[in-house]
């Protein structure tokens, strides 16, 4: 069995896609991460970045192996790439979509609606992959065991309007990656969430805002359910993680602004990096 564990950032933006000159270096697609784990594939979120993940998977089809997609929540920026995910239309593919249990029936209908008129001409008959849906129970300790000892655990975090999100922890061969996006924690994470993340080798954390925009007087973003850079840094320190990747950037921020955010973050936590579209990272201890 292969022991490799890597992450490719396929989409790193929050809220909506922003292609263009100002976002070329770090990318303009919305949230999606492709994990390659011991030769298997797990995808976290299905924003427009999943389209690129589909192209990568198309180049190396793996018959008999399901592609597992884990959704943090169903906001449009985290699911809008699904109708353009190439394996959906490959009869050899098996796709399992895991999503938070809240309003499970309506959630599955909401995901299927992406393929239905008037939003799309595809219809459900147009999906050729074997597709199944698995709601995940909210709360701590829920874990899905995939083949080859890959474990995907989740815990719910309730700051994001209106139904909160799931934070995911993916473990394989003694290494751990945590994906915590669309979270707002003006203090630091509560004790149960800190325990869930503690000691992760790599933490991908919501960093939507700089402090001025978050506080922002009349245009304050408090309560929008997103973090600032300093919240991400505080949580990385409190949880004792190895590396921190800032993620889910505000769509109005240019590449230059992101680099200024990185410089600020490194003052508090030197092992901080910017999530960058197309960048492949090895998970190591
Ligand atoms: Zn989002
Ligand atoms: Zn959201």
Image (cartoon, rainbow, N blue to C red):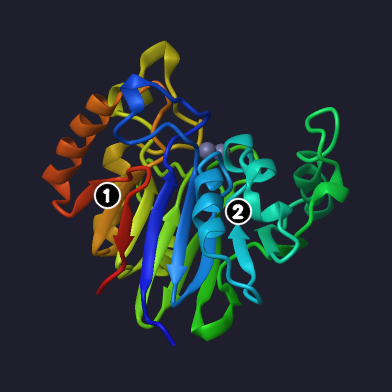
Rendered image quadrant of residue 220: top left
For the question of whether residue 105 can be seen, the reply is yes
Along the viewing direction, whichever of 92 and 133 lies nearer the viewer: 92
Would residue 215 be seen by someone viewing this image from the given angle?
no
Residue 213: x %, y % from top left: 35, 22
Q: Is residue 266 left or right of residue 224?
A: left
Q: Of discs 1 and 2, which sits in the foreground?
A: 2
Q: Which residue is mark 2?
A: 71
Which quarter of the figure is the C terminus placed in? bottom left
Q: Nearer the viewer, residue 127 or 221?
A: 127
Residue 241 versus residue 96: which sits nearer the camera?
96
Tag 1–tag 2 contact (CB < 8 Å):
no
Marker count (numbered) = 2
| Residue 150 x, y percent position in the rendering | 50, 78
Is residue 133 shown above or below 150? above
- The answer to whether 23 is drawn above or below residue 71 in the figure is above
Residue at horizontal 37%, vertical 26%?
Answer: 214
**Residue at (58% x, 42% y) in the render:** 78
Task: Give the crowd class for mark 2: few <14, some 14-19, many >=20 residues within 10 Å.
Answer: many
| Quarter of the rendering containing residue 238 | bottom left
Q: Secondary structure at mark 2?
A: loop
SS for dot 1: helix
- The residue wearing badge 1 is 234
Residue 200 in percent (x, y) is at 33, 68
Q: Decide if ligand 1 comes within 8 Å of the CB at mark 1.
A: no
- In the drawing, does residue 116 fall left or right of residue 81? right
The yes-or-no answer for disc 2 within 8 Å of ligand 2 is: no
* Quadrant position of residue 260: top left
Farthest top residue in view: 218
Name the mark on residue 16.
Answer: none
Residue positioned 64% across, 73% down in the render? 63
């Amino acid at each position: 069995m292969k022991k490799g564990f890597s992450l490719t950032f396929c989409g790193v933006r929050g809220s909506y896609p922003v292609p263009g000159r100002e976002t070329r270096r770090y990318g303009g697609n919305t949230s999606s991460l492709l994990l390659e784990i011991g030769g298997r594939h797990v995808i976290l979120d299905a924003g427009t970045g999943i389209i690129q993940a589909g192209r990568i998977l198309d180049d190396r089809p793996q018959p008999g192996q399901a592609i597992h997609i884990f959704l943090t929540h169903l906001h449009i920026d985290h699911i809008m790439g699904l109708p353009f995910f190439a394996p959906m239309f490959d009869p050899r593919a098996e796709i399992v979509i895991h999503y938070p249990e809240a309003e499970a029936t309506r959630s599955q209908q909401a995901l299927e609606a992406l393929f239905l008129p008037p939003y799309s001409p595809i219809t459900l008959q147009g999906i050729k992959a074997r597709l199944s849906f698995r709601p995940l129970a909210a709360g701590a300790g829920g874990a899905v065991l995939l083949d080859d000892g890959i474990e995907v655990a989740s815990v719910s975090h309730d700051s994001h309007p209106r139904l909160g999100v799931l934070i995911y922890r993916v473990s394989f061969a003694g290494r751990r990656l945590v994906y915590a996006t669309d979270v707002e924690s003006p203090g630091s994470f509560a004790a149960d969430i800190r325990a869930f993340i503690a000691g992760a080798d790599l933490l991908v954390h919501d960093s939507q805002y700089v402090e001025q925009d978050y506080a922002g007087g009349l245009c304050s973003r408090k309560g929008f359910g997103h973090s600032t850079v300093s919240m991400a840094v505080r949580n990385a320190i409190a949880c004792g993680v190895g590396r921190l990747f800032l993620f889910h950037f505000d769509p109005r921020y240019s590449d230059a602004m992101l680099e200024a955010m990185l410089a600020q973050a490194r003052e508090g936590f030197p092992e901080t990096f910017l999530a960058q579209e197309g960048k492949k990272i090895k998970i190591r201890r």
